[in-house]
C-alpha cells in the first residue's frame, strides 16, 4: 500500500481529529492531540493494509501559558 493510500485511510477513519501532511522524502507525518495517539498508533498497527511494525519518531510540543 502506498503512503498516499495509508493517509487516505487515516483521513477516512479519523477525519478532522488527525492532520496528515503530504509525504516528504518517503516519510509521512500525522498530527493528533495527545488523547488520540494510542488510537491512531493502534489503527496503523492493526488495520489491514497499514500494518506498521516500527515506530521511528514521536514528537510533542508543550503549549505553556505566556508569562
Image (tube, grey):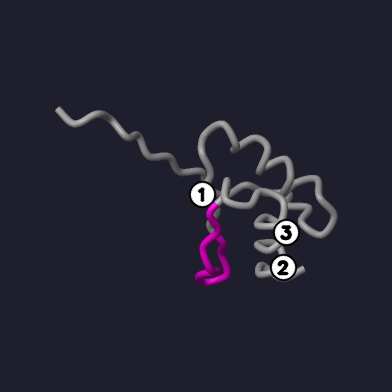
Residue at horizontal 51 percent and vertical 38 percent from the top: 33
Task: Give above or below for 1 relative to 45.
Answer: below
Q: Is 24 in the magenta?
A: yes
Q: Quadrant of the C terminus?
A: top left
Residue at horizontal 77 percent and vertical 68 percent from the top: 1
In the rendered image, residue 51, in percent from the top left (x then y), is placed at: 78, 53
Element marked by disc 2: helix
Which sits earlier in the primary sequence, circle 1 or circle 2?
2
| The disc label shown at residue 31, or none | 1
- Residue range corresponding to the magenta coloring: 19-28
Task: Give above or below for 57 relative to 25.
Answer: above
Query: Within the image, what quadrant is residue 4 found in?
Result: bottom right
Element marked by disc 1: strand
Residue furthest to the front: 16
Which residue carries the number 2 mark? 5
Viewer-proximal residue, 39 or 14? 14
Element marked by disc 3: helix
Residue at horizontal 82 percent and vertical 60 percent from the top: 49
Amino acid at each position: 500500500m502506498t503512503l498516499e493510500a495509508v493517509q487516505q485511510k487515516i483521513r477516512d477513519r479519523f477525519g478532522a481529529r488527525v492532520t496528515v501532511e503530504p509525504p516528504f522524502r518517503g516519510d509521512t507525518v500525522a498530527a493528533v492531540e495527545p488523547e488520540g495517539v494510542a488510537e491512531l498508533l493502534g489503527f496503523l498497527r492493526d488495520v489491514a493494509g497499514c500494518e506498521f511494525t516500527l515506530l521511528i519518531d514521536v514528537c510533542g510540543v508543550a503549549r505553556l501559558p505566556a508569562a
